[in-house]
Amino acid sequence: MIDHSKVQKRTTADIAKRIVQDIPDGAHVNLGIGQPMTICNYLPADKEILMHSENGLLGMGPLAKEHEIDEELVNAGKQPVTMLPGASLCHHADSFVMIRGGHIDICVLGAFQVSVKGDIANWRTGDPKAIPAVGGAMDLALGAKKLFVMMEHLTKSGESKLVMECTYPLTALAAVDCIYTDLATIAVMPEGLVAIDWVDGLSFEELQELSGVPMRKLGK
Amino acid sequence: MIDKIIPSVASAVQDIGDGSTILVSGFGGAGLPIYLLDALAEQGAKNLTIISNNAGNSGIGIAKLIGNGQVKKVVCSFPRQPESGAFDDLYRAGKIELELVPQGTLAERIRAGGAGIGGFYTPTGYGTELAIGKDTRVIDGVNHIFETAIKTDYALIKADKGDRWGNLTYHRTGRNFGPIMATAARCTIAQVNQVVELGALDPETIVTPGIFVKRVVLVGGKS
C-alpha cells in the first residue's frame, strides 16, 4: 500500500519550476491556457526565453499591472499582458505560421490524458452538455518542435491520466515529448515511457502502480 | 476620387442581407468590432453565418446577435468563454449550428480564401474527431488532412487608424484576425478609432493595404 501522507507532491509552482529547468536559453516558447500559463512567473533571469502568444505576440512580458492594462494587449487566455523590449506583433495567420511551420521550440499544454505513445487528449471530455472548444491546441500539439504536458498525475477520483489508449477525444497523435506532473517527470520515448524523476516519499514501483502503465527508469 | 469613409455604422452595415456569411475579427474582446456588431444587431439581418475565433460573451457583440436569434451557424475555434451563455443555451438546445475549427486551421482557411487558394493539406487535426470525413494524404511521411478555404460576403473588422483609401493600422494584439479577414470577404467594413489624411500613414507600417477594404467608419473612442 502506498502511504500517501509521505508523498511530497509538487505544487503547481513546483511543476512550473521543474519545466523551466528544461527550457534552454534562447528558446521560443508557447504556453497553453490554464496551468501552463503560470510558467511565465518563474522564468530565470539568466536565460533569455521568448514567449509567444497565439494571438499574434512574440516577446510577451508578465501579466499587466493595473496601470499597464491595455484591453487590446492580451494573452491566449484573454488576460491583459505586457510586451518586453524587442517584442513584435503579427496577424493570426503569421502567428500560426510560427506554430504550424515548426518555428516554436517548445509548447506546454495541459491535458486530460496522455497515452504511452504520446497521444494527447485535452480539448473535450465527451460530456454531451459541455461546449466543445479546441482553440489552438491541435495546431500547437503538432507544430511545436517539442510538446511538454503539465498536468496532475491522477484525476480527482484517483485514476491515472497516463493511459494505454486515450478514451477522451484526441487532440493529436504521438505528439508529446515529456510529461510533468505533481508526482513525476516522464519522457515519451519511441520504446515507451521513461521516468526521469519522481517526488520524495514515492518509490519507482509505487509510481508505476499509480500510473497503471508500463514505464522504465532512466538509464535502465 | 476614392473615398471609402462612411458617415455612420448604420449606413456601413445597411446592405447586409439575411443569410449572409460574415467574418468578424477579434480574440475575446481584443480587436472585436463592437460598434459594427451593435449596428448589425439594430439592423436585424437574420440567418447569418458568423465566422470568428469565439462565439461572443456577456451579451455583447456576437453574443448579442446570437441572443437576438440572428445567427444560424457559428464557425469558430473556441466558443466556450466566461458568460458565453447566449451561444451555450442555443447549442445545447440544438438551435444553432457549430463548426469547430482548430485556430490555426481557421486562420489559414481565411488566409487561403483571401489568397485565391482553394484549400490546403495540414497535419493539424489528423486522427481526431475534427478530421472525420475529410480527405487525407501522406506528404513527406506525415499524415495530412484537406481543409477548404473560407470566403465570405462580408468581413467586419476593427482597426486603429484608417484613411479614405482604406489603408489600415491596428493596435497591439487587437490586430489578430483583422488583416486576413479583410482579404477574404467580398465586402470588408472596418471600424476605426481614427480617420487620418491620405499620406499620414507611413507606407512602411500600413498593415492592411486599402485594396482589401471597401468601407471605413469612424467610431467613438476605443472600445
Image (cartoon, coloured by chain):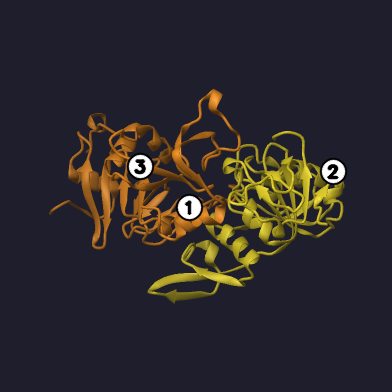
Q: Which residue is mark 3?
A: A49
Badge 3 density bin: few <14, some 14–19, many ≥20, Cα 10 Å: many
Mark 1 belongs to chain:
A
CA gap, disc 3 to disc 2?
Answer: 46 Å
Callout 2 environment at 10 Å: few (<14), some (14 to 19), or many (20+)? some
Figure colour of chain B:
yellow
Give SS at disc 3: loop
Q: Are marks 1 and 2 on the same chain?
A: no
The colour with which the image depicts chain A is orange
Give residue B8's mark: 2
Looking at this view, is A36 or A94 the one in front?
Answer: A94
In the image, what residue type sits under mark 1? Ala
> What type is the residue that disc 3 sits on?
Ile
Residue B53 visible: yes
Select label 1 or label 2 by which is in front: 2
Counting from the top left corner in percent of width and height, residue B214 is at 77, 56
- Disc 1 and disc 3 on one polypeptide chain: yes
